[in-house]
Image (tube, grey):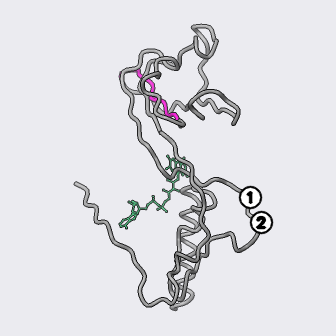
Amino acid sequence: MSLFILVDVSFHNFSVDPLSKQPRRTWTYWYVHHVSAISLNNNFFKQPKNWSQPQAILTTSNSSTPWATIQQVARNKNGMNIYKLFCFRNITSTIDRYFLGVNKVHVKYWRYTFPVLAPIERQSQFQAIQLDDNVFNINTMESVASAMEGSVISGRNVAMMVKEKWT
Ligand SMILES: Cc1cc2nc3c(=O)[nH]c(=O)nc-3n(C[C@H](O)[C@H](O)[C@H](O)COP(=O)(O)OP(=O)(O)OC[C@H]3O[C@@H](n4cnc5c(N)ncnc54)[C@H](O)[C@@H]3O)c2cc1C
C-alpha cells in the first residue's frame, strides 16, 4: 500500500517569496504510450516481412509521424514485445498502423516532460540553487535538462552545501 500526503508548500517571513524570483522555463508535454504487440508493422516502415527490426526509432523535427520515438523496452514471457512511444497526441485509435498483433495499449499524459532547451545566455537565466539563507532548491538542474542523473548530482551537491554550512 502507498500513502501520498500532498504538502501545501508556502513561504513565510521572507521579504520576497523565493520562488517568485526564479526565472521560469517553458515545458513540453508528451503522451507516453506503452504498447504490447507482436512486432512493428513492416508495411508502415516499407520493409519486407522478415526484416531485422530496430530497437529504437528516432525522428527529426520535420517528421510527419505523430510520435517522436519508438523504443522496444521489453519482451514478455508469452513472446509479446513491449514498446514505448513518445507522442504529440494520443494515438491509440491508429496504433495498428505502426504495429502488428496489438493486444494492449497504455497511455499516460505527462504535462511537464522536459524543458524547452532555449540557449542560456546569462547567468541570471539559471534558477538559483540557494534561494535564501538556509533555503535550497535541489531541482535547479531539472529546469535546464530533466534527467535522473542531474537530479541525483544536484541533490548530492545541496547535501554537501548543507553539511559545509552546519558542521
Ligand atoms: C515521460 C518522462 C520520461 C523521462 N525519461 C527519463 C529518462 O529516460 N532518463 C532520465 O534520466 N530521466 C527521465 N525523465 C526525468 C526524470 O523523471 C526526472 O529527472 C526525475 O524524476 C526528477 O526527480 P525528482 O526527485 O527531482 O522529482 P520527481 O521524481 O518528480 O519527484 C518529486 C516527488 O514530489 C512529489 N510532490 C510534488 N509536490 C508535492 C507536494 N506539494 N507534497 C508532497 N509531495 C509532492 C511528487 O508527487 C513526486 O513524487 C523523464 C521524465 C518524464 C516525465
Residue drawn 43% across and 27% down?
A: 92
- In the image, 60 versus 3, the foreground residue is 60
Up/down of 115 relative to 33, above or below: below
Q: Residue furthest left?
A: 1
Give how far across and how far down residue 107 sits, in percent. Answer: 41, 36
Task: Determine the secondary structure under disc 1.
Answer: loop
Magenta-tinted stretch? 78-85
- In the image, 53 versus 118, the foreground residue is 118
Ligand 1 within 8 A of label 2's CB? no
Residue placed under numbered mark 1 in the picture: 119
Task: Determine the secondary structure under disc 2.
Answer: loop
Secondary structure mostly seen in magenta is strand
In the rendered image, residue 2 lying in the magenta stretch gets the answer: no
Residue drawn 54% across and 71% down?
A: 156
Residue drawn 52% across and 34% down?
A: 85
Picture quarter containing residue 152?
A: bottom right
Up/down of 152 relative to 165, above or below: above
Picture quarter containing residue 103?
A: top left
Q: Residues within 10 Å of mark 2 (few under 14, many from 20)?
A: few
Distance between mark 1 and mark 2 Cα atoms: 6 Å
Give how far across and how far down residue 48 sits, in percent. Answer: 62, 8
- In the image, 42 versus 28, the foreground residue is 28
- In the image, 68 versus 155, the foreground residue is 68
Q: Amino acid at mark 2?
A: Glu
Give how far across and how far down residue 55 sits, in percent. Answer: 58, 28
Badges 1 and 2: C-beta atoms under 8 Å apart? yes
Residue placed under numbered mark 2 in the picture: 121
Q: Amino acid at mark 1?
A: Pro
